[in-house]
Amino acid sequence: MTTDTLNLSDTSTWLPLDGLAPGFDAAKAELTDALVGRSFTIVDEDGGRTTYRFDADAVAWESDPETGRDDVEVIEVDEELYYAQYTTAAHPDEAVTLILDLRSGHALTVISTLGTAAPGRTAVQMSFTPSTIAELELRGEAPAPTDELIGRRVLWVYSTVHAYEHVYLSPHWYSWHCLAGPEQGLADTDENTVWRVRPGIYVFTWREKVIPCGSVTIADHRDQKALRAHGVLFGTDEAGTGATHFTFGAHGRLLSNTVHPVEYDPSRPLER
C-alpha cells in the first residue's frame, strides 16, 4: 500500500513504539567503559544528593532513602562528557538520563515518567534537575534551558531505513516529519524542551501526544554538516500493559535556518 492510499491523518493506524524499534538503533554509538570503577555524587540546588558507582554494565545508585543497581548504557558524547541511560527495577515507569560533564563539574538528570495522557498532558512527563559533581571542581557554565535551536531545520538519519526532519519552532514546540522508514509520510508537532550543556551541544527532549512516548537525546550541533545525536525512546508497549525502552543514535545535517524579525521572535515572552 502506498502513502497515496493511506489516510495519514488516521492516527489510530500509526505504529506503536515497538514497531519503530527494529533497526532504529543502527547508528547508535559504541558504549564506553571510561566510567567503570568510578563514583560520582551529584548535588542538586536543594542539597539533595545521589551517588553513582559505575560497573561494566550496571550502575549502583543511592539517593536517600532508596538504593538500587540497574543495567546502564554509557556513551561518550565529547571529551569528558557522558550520556548514561537506565531504567530502575524499583520504578519501571521511569527512565533516567544522566549527563555528566567531568570537565565542568556539572551534571543534568532527566527523569521520564510514563503515565496516562489527559487533556493538556502527554503520557510521558519529564523533570530536569541540574546538579554539581561533588568530587570535581566547577570550571564551566551550568546546564540551562536555551532557545538556541529555534529556527533550525535538521535532517536526522537513524539507519539506512529511518530518516526524519525536525523543525524547531519555539521553546515549547517542534515539528517532525518522517522522510523514510515505517512512518514515512507521517508528521506532527509535539512538545519539546531544550537544555544547553556545552557550546553547541544540547539536550533535546520531546513528548508525543499521539503515541504515548517521549525521548531524551543529546545532540552535537557544532559541525552543521556532521551533526551527531544519541538518545532513548521510552513509552507504552503495543499491548498497552508495559513500557518499551530502547536507545539509538543518529547522524544529521542542518538543512536551513529561519531568522525571525525581532517583533515575531518565537522565544519572546508570551502575551496574554
Image (tube, grey):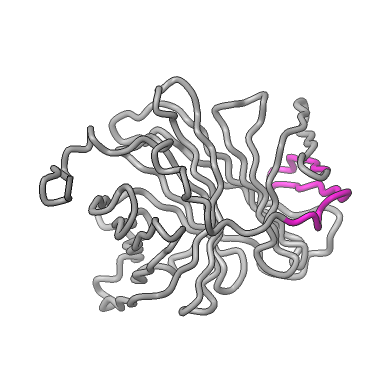
User: For the image shown, how many numbered marks are present on the structure?
Assistant: 0
What residue is rendered at 23% in x and 32% in y?
12
Front residue (pair 184, 117): 184
> Was residue 240 drawn as part of the magenta stretch in this picture?
no
Q: Which residue lies most toward the front here?
A: 1
Query: Which corner quadrant of the image does residue 177 belong to?
Result: bottom left
Front residue (pair 239, 266): 239
- Asked if residue 151 lies left or right of residue 76, the reply is left
Front residue (pair 26, 190): 26
Q: Position of residue 40 (x, y in %)?
A: 82, 49
Whether 115 is drawn above or below 207: the answer is above
Q: Give the range drawn in magenta.
A: 32-53
Query: Which corner quadrant of the image does residue 91 belong to?
Result: top right
Quarter of the image with the N terminus is: top left
Q: Where is residue 106 in the image (x, y as percent from the top left)?
A: 71, 59
What residue is rendered at 39% in x and 38% in y?
19
Front residue (pair 97, 261): 97
- Asked if residue 1 lies left or right of residue 22, the reply is left
Q: Position of residue 211 (x, y in %)?
A: 34, 37
Q: Position of residue 204 (x, y in %)?
A: 49, 57
What residue is rendered at 27% in x and 76% in y?
260
